[in-house]
């Protein structure tokens, strides 16, 4: 088999030939067909995320050791499994939940692996999907996406799930409540499409690059604002009838969080997802008196991935612009993502 491995932080992925792994215990072996090439892999390849004020989140300190096969949006055919695996759908195609944990802690036992304190994520701490074969720790992480375009399905494991989990954190909220999405990139567009598919009536996009507005309108945005025009943006958000219930910040800059917090109605919620590296400064009195909730959201749980897949199966969730690349092109796609030159999502295909 081959894999595309990160051997040195910040360097191109290297193609490596190795023996095909043999699944042990509950493990399942997948022959990969597709794996989404995600923007977060740009940071993972570099080895860090900026935290603001010059601080960095180092991948090495989060248990990522090199060499590592990256790729966390895998889709493929089930080949074989270890002796402890039951009900293995051999020969069938499955989407793989990549945010796997230790399997033992209370979060993992509740299928909230994404909250595990010892994460074993595919493509970060465990070998991932930029390869011809992939070992999945348990059959429970395989999801039947029958009927959905497999290229779209692979994107659901990361951006779809991340957007869906953030939207769920807005609950309790009605379909008439006003929601603002900060950031009109892949995640923001996915969130707009999911909100529309769920039947939400008022979906605002706050995006500084007005060239991205047309795509957002097509996806379902009902109002567009530019958060760079700070005072005007806050004024517009505060003027919606009944007030702004929720904000999902897929940027995570100081300014997006500030516009969100200044605009929310009493009892409103800010869900912070983006890893741009901003900081929130808020008087604790304001937090209390306006009964605000600020919650972080990182990827999503296994049941949430099943839910967003079910939503896609209804046909109401419109796929985003998708394109494919070969395995050998993954590294250069990451370079293009870093330069902001990619429209929509790119999925690697392993023929
Ligand atoms: Zn991703
Ligand atoms: Zn765990």
Image (tube, rainbow, N blue to C red):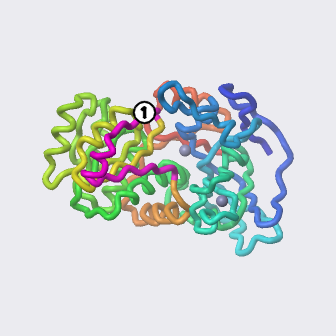
Is residue 130 magenta-colored? no
Task: Please provide percent x and percent y for residue 46.
Answer: 62, 29
78 or 230, nearer to the observer: 230
Q: Is residue 151 visible?
A: no
28 or 99, nearer to the observer: 99
Task: Please provide percent x and percent y for residue 341.
Answer: 47, 27
66 sits left or right of 339 in the view: right
Farthest residue toward the bottom?
87
Ligand 2 position by quadrant: bottom right
Question: Badge 1 is on which residue?
Answer: 278
Quadrant in which the N terminus is drawn? top right
Crowding at mark 1 (Cα within 10 Å: few <14, some 14-19, many 20+): some
212 or 244, nearer to the observer: 244
Farthest residue toward the right?
19
| Residue appearing at x 48%, y 37% in the figure | 275
Q: Work out whether 136 lies above or below 257.
A: below
Task: Please provide percent x and percent y for residue 127.
Answer: 72, 46
Q: Is residue 234 visible?
A: yes
The residues colored magenta run 276-299
């Amino acid at each position: 088999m081959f894999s595309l491995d990160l051997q040195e932080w910040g360097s191109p992925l290297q193609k490596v030939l190795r023996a095909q792994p043999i699944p042990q215990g509950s493990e399942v072996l997948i022959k990969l067909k597709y794996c989404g090439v995600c923007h977060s892999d740009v940071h993972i390849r570099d080895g860090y995320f900026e935290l603001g004020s010059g601080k960095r989140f180092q991948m090495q300190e989060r248990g990522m050791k090199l060499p590592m096969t990256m790729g966390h949006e895998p889709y493929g055919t089930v080949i074989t499994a270890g002796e402890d695996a039951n009900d293995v759908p051999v020969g069938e195609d499955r989407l793989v939940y990549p945010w796997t944990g230790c399997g033992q802690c209370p979060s993992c036992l509740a299928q909230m692996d994404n909250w595990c304190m010892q994460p074993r994520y595919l493509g970060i701490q465990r070998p991932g999907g930029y390869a011809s074969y992939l070992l999945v720790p348990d059959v429970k992480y395989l999801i039947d996406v029958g009927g959905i375009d497999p290229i779209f399905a692979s994107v659901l494991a990361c951006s779809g799930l991340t957007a869906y989990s953030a939207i769920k954190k807005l609950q309790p909220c009605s379909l008439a409540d006003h929601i603002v999405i900060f950031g009109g990139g892949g995640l923001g567009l996915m969130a707009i499409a999911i909100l529309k598919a769920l039947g939400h009536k008022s979906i605002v996009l706050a995006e500084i690059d007005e060239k991205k507005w047309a795509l957002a309108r097509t996806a379902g945005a009902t109002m567009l604002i530019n958060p760079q025009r700070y005072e005007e943006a806050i004024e517009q958000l505060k003027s919606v009838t009944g007030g702004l219930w929720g904000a999902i910040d897929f940027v995570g800059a100081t300014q997006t969080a500030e516009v969100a917090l200044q605009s929310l109605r009493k009892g409103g919620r800010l869900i912070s997802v983006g890893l741009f590296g901003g900081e929130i400064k808020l008087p604790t009195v304001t937090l209390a008196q306006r009964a605000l909730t600020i919650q972080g959201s990182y990827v999503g749980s296994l049941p949430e991935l099943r839910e967003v897949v079910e939503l896609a199966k209804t046909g109401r969730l419109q796929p985003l612009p998708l394109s494919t690349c070969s395995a050998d092109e993954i590294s250069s796609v990451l370079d293009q993502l870093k330069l902001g030159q990619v429209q929509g999502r790119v999925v690697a295909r392993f023929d």
